[in-house]
Amino acid sequence: MLRSTVMCCLALGLLLHAMPAVVAQAHEPTGDPSVVLKTPNLVAFWTFGEEPGQLRESIAPEGSYPLKEVNGPIATADVGPYSGHSVDFNGTQYLQLDYDKTGKLNISGPDAQVSMFAVVRIIDLRQSRTIAGMWSEGKGRDDDSGTRQYSMLMNMPTYGGPNQLVPHISAEGGVTRRADGSAFPWCADYAATKRKVPEEQWCTLAFTYDGKYITAYINGTYEKRELDAKKDRRDDRYFTQEGPDGKDRGMNPYYHGRGIFKYDPEKHAESKPDGGSDFTVGARYAVGSFLREATKGKFGGLAVFDRALTDEEILALHKSANIDALNAADKK
């Protein structure tokens, strides 16, 4: 069944790729899923074509990675880049895969790399929102019990990311620590784009982590952003002096360089009693709740890779969604 689904998606993608650029009607995919499927190191790829009440399955060859709905059936919209549909989050629901089922999505370790790509239409960025990831923050400020790994988040003004794309990587799981071991009140390790995340229009969002740098992309484009320590609220020595060669860490790309947290049930039994982080889409566990910062908007595609993709690959993924046609179809 999985093999036939993948072959159908590939055939559909090739057909769409060969067709002249036209405005797609509702229910018709605007994009080419084969571009995503053929990108090396793909772990999971969801196109969200299922009906409400069903598990959302990955169509990547690695495995299905079924995402279950939390807080009731989640609406499906009749517009999307790869299946002709999208999942429509209302801010009170999200999708979840239990930690013990995350498999190759459980990307962790000192040499780990990860990339994420999403096709979304976000509404209401007045507070922090989540695309997806393995990111459990614990109960709030100064709480070190979190089991954060990687996540693509939006709107994080604490350290210079208001309304921007702010992909996070954590080496500690809990709060970020300086070289001398002293702690921040939160996780402070994230890149931040120059541009704000587009609202009420389809766009692509992506990030890569190559083991050293986190890089964020909006609509297939990476824009370098230098650190402005005072303006970006990153004047702590951690940001200004603990980067490469004793220099600053930058903003986009942002230097992390310490790998991705790996949960160990024996080592962390007392310090992180809630266990490893689930993989979630549209929400994360933050300040003691999954729903306090849950996302509103449509998700038409989501892909995770266990490698840092190149700029060219990110741009190719963006083009595969055919955003112009998607926005036109969404207005019908």
Image (tube, grey):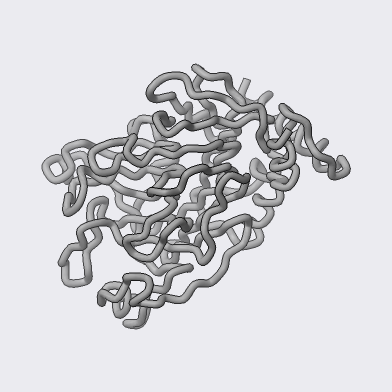
Locate residue 19, reporting x and y percent: 87, 40
Locate residue 165, reporting x and y percent: 48, 56
Locate residue 22, reporting x and y percent: 84, 41
Which is nearer the eye, 245 or 234?
234
Taking the view exactly as shown, the residue that stands out farthest to the top is 53
In the image, taking residue 199 as reference, residue 233 lies left or right, namely left
- Quadrant containing the N terminus is top right
Taking the view exactly as shown, the residue that stands out farthest to the left is 270
Which is nearer the eye, 148 or 269?
148
Which is nearer the eye, 154 or 16?
154
Could you tell me which residue is drawn at 27 percent across and 46 percent down? Answer: 137
Could you tell me which residue is drawn at 57 percent across and 19 percent down? Answer: 51
Q: How many marks?
A: 0
Q: Residue 185 appears in which quarter of the rendering?
A: bottom left
Which is nearer the eye, 58 or 77?
77
Could you tell me which residue is drawn at 38 percent across and 49 percent down? Answer: 128
